[in-house]
Amino acid sequence: MPYPGELASKTTHSDIVRNPEVAEFLKGCDYLKIPSDAEGRQVAQRFVEPPAGGDLPRFVIAVDGSSHEASIDDQLPSTKVGYIRIGAVLIDLEKFGSLRVGNFVDPFRVADLQNSNTGLVFTIPSANIRWGDHRTVRESFRAWLDHQFDSPSTRFKPNDPFTSLRATLFFLASQRSGELGTNNPNLLKIFKCPVCGQGPVEIPNSPEAHHCPFCQSPVYPTDCLRLWEEIQENQSNQAALNRLMLTLEHLIPFHYMYQIYKQSPLILSKMAFFIDGPLAVFGPPAWLHHSFMTLLDKVNKRLQEKNCDPLLVIGLQKTGQIVDHINLIERFVSKNRIFAIDDDYRYQYILPGRDPSSDGFGSETYYGQDFILKTPSGRSFSIGLPYPFASKKLSGASFVREKVKLENYPQLPQAVKLINLLESDLYENAVVPIALAHHYTAISLEPGGKVLDLLTRRAMNRE
């Protein structure tokens, strides 16, 4: 690492360029390659015309997040506070359809549409920051994160803690498989105490403080996410900050779904949720994927009993390996085509050289199936739809085979119709809800990040 202000040499790269071991390494690497014309035509044959039909939902909610880590002082660049903003944009499709007046778009109606947004802000004590009387950064992170999950800002009813994000986490944790599941929405288990390492530890959903029965240290419901494992004491926690942000991008929409399900479940048949990225949770909180599948199954069975459409959830990837692959093959694919990515295809064309998982791709992380969709206008999307099963353990059938059958996804026609309606020229292969959600959550380095730096310093009496 250079000293502050030290400039890099303009010639040091020459040693790397001439190094024969570097050339040997690069020659031995396997990676995503441009398909030949013959391979491209063969790939295109796997695409089919998507099923038509389906009624559009009335409301669309899109969720996106952004993060920034701010130094509290120019003289203390290694002392940092982290910020996360999770935004949700609500679009009424009846209003969306009235945006156009003749051949023009009414700017006042667009402004009204953009006003239907809200956001949650999360802060975390990062490098060299301790909160309250807590002794370490990790202890501070654990306590403050739990406090924020129970904050009135996350509650559907400000005076009711059972409508908070923490209450939703209790339900999701209770649906875990194996010994950590309780089937009691007011009781969860954490795998091990973050202090002594023993466990599991049971925590009830009650307002008083909770302590580990083995070492008497404080324990918190949010410890079940195990995000504290990635917190460092004396260096940047940007990696942990990003992990929390990505987890919240899934937790927040499922928080909305669960609380609406408890109060007015039939409304969910008129709603669609856009989630930024694949329908998967990675890292220590990956266990959430199973609980998401369980909740979606409960919701859709309830809606089916009332002869209502299933809840529509769509993951939309803007970047990543699938998007890179789409850029390589879309010239071969006709318009208005769709393909459910099976494991064989993924390991042949998208993840070449990887050893296939014995339990199927994404067995520990994914709760939805990836599709490649090319719309009638010629735009291509990487979308995900939730698996139409309560569990990946199917009775008398292979999950790996069943997950790619289009007929198993009753919400697919509705999803295709919705994306065709909402595709946007604002960014390459974008849809309006995700574009708006990102617009209202993105923390830019100029000026957004600078504003947060200033906010941090003033709040801590540094300016």
Image: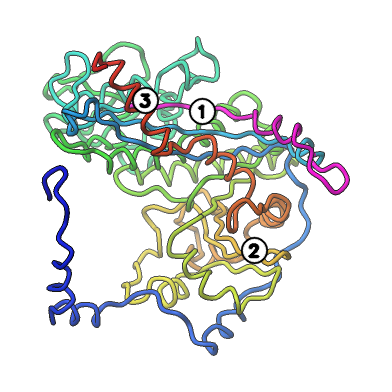
Name the N-terminal-most of marks 1 and 3: 1
Q: What kind of residue is marked 2?
A: Arg
Q: Secondary structure at mark 2?
A: loop
Name the N-terminal-most of marks 3 and 2: 3
To which quarter of the image does residue 269 belong? Answer: top right
Task: Verify CB contact (< 8 Å) between mark 1 and mark 3.
Answer: no
Determine which residue is flagged by label 1.
Answer: 119
What's the residue at 53%, 36% (across, down)?
253
Determine which residue is flagged by label 2.
Answer: 379
Q: What kind of residue is marked 1?
A: Gly
Magenta segment boundaries in residue numbering: 99-123
To which quarter of the image does residue 194 belong? Answer: top left
- The crowd level at tag 2 (other Cα within 10 Å; few <14, some 14-19, many 20+) is some
Determine which residue is flagged by label 3.
Answer: 187
- Image coordinates of residue 172 in percent, x first then y, are 43, 34
Q: Mark number for residue 164? A: none
Closer to the eye: label 1 or 3: 1
